[in-house]
Image: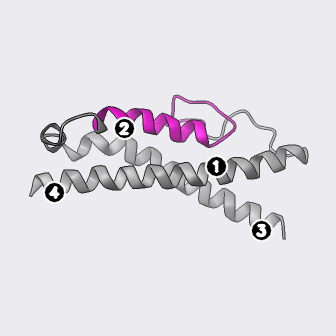
Amino acid sequence: MKKQVMQKIIEAIRENLALAYQKAIDCDAMLEQLKEQGHGQFSAIFSDGFNTKADRFLPYVEEVAASFYPITQLSVNQQNQLNAAEFSDIIKQLEIIFATQTKFQQTFVEDSQ
């Protein structure tokens, strides 16, 4: 049972990272538009929860992916020995990224109408 759960968690994180990556590309394009219009004068999207300090989303997604990568290099047996709590930081970071991306996209669409 634990084996299936671990594999599902790992696959869900992998899928969410791919989605966060795609959304980061979209959000970063919107940020570039704002910058060209003279808006978006800030140095970091997130003030805490990440080591990265960037004015774009992609570096934050890359930080999470770098944390997750070593797990993907483990054998299935090694992955199945992991505790779900070991994923808590990665999951929290993804939640923060998704919430901020969604809010930003909604605000960008509202402001451009």
Q: Specify the color scheme.
A: one colour
Q: Tell me how far mark 1 sits from mark 4, CA to CA.
A: 32 Å
Q: Residue furthest bottom?
A: 113
Of pointers 1 and 3, the one earlier in the residue sequence = 1
Q: Which residue is mark 3?
A: 110
Q: Is residue 10 above or below residue 45?
A: below
Circle 3 — which element?
Answer: helix
Circle 2 — which element?
Answer: helix
Q: Residue furthest right?
A: 37
| Magenta stretch contains residue 60 | yes
Q: Which residue is mark 1?
A: 25
Circle 1 — which element?
Answer: helix
Of pointers 4 and 3, the one earlier in the residue sequence = 4
Q: Is residue 30 above or below residue 41?
A: below
Task: Tell me whether the residue at label 1 lies in contact with that at label 4, contact meaning CB atoms closer than 8 angstroms.
Answer: no
Of pointers 2 and 3, the one earlier in the residue sequence = 2
Which amino acid does the dot numbered 2 rest on?
A: Phe
Which amino acid does the dot numbered 3 rest on?
A: Glu
Q: Which residue is mark 4?
A: 4
Circle 4 — which element?
Answer: helix
Q: Tell me how far mark 1 sits from mark 3, CA to CA.
A: 19 Å
Q: Is residue 34 above or below residue 48?
A: below
Which residue sits at x=53%, y=55%? Answer: 98
Region in magenta: 46-71
Q: Tell me how far mark 4 sits from mark 3, CA to CA.
A: 42 Å
Q: Which residue is mark 2?
A: 68
Task: Tell me whether the residue at label 2 lies in contact with that at label 3, contact meaning CB atoms closer than 8 angstroms.
Answer: no
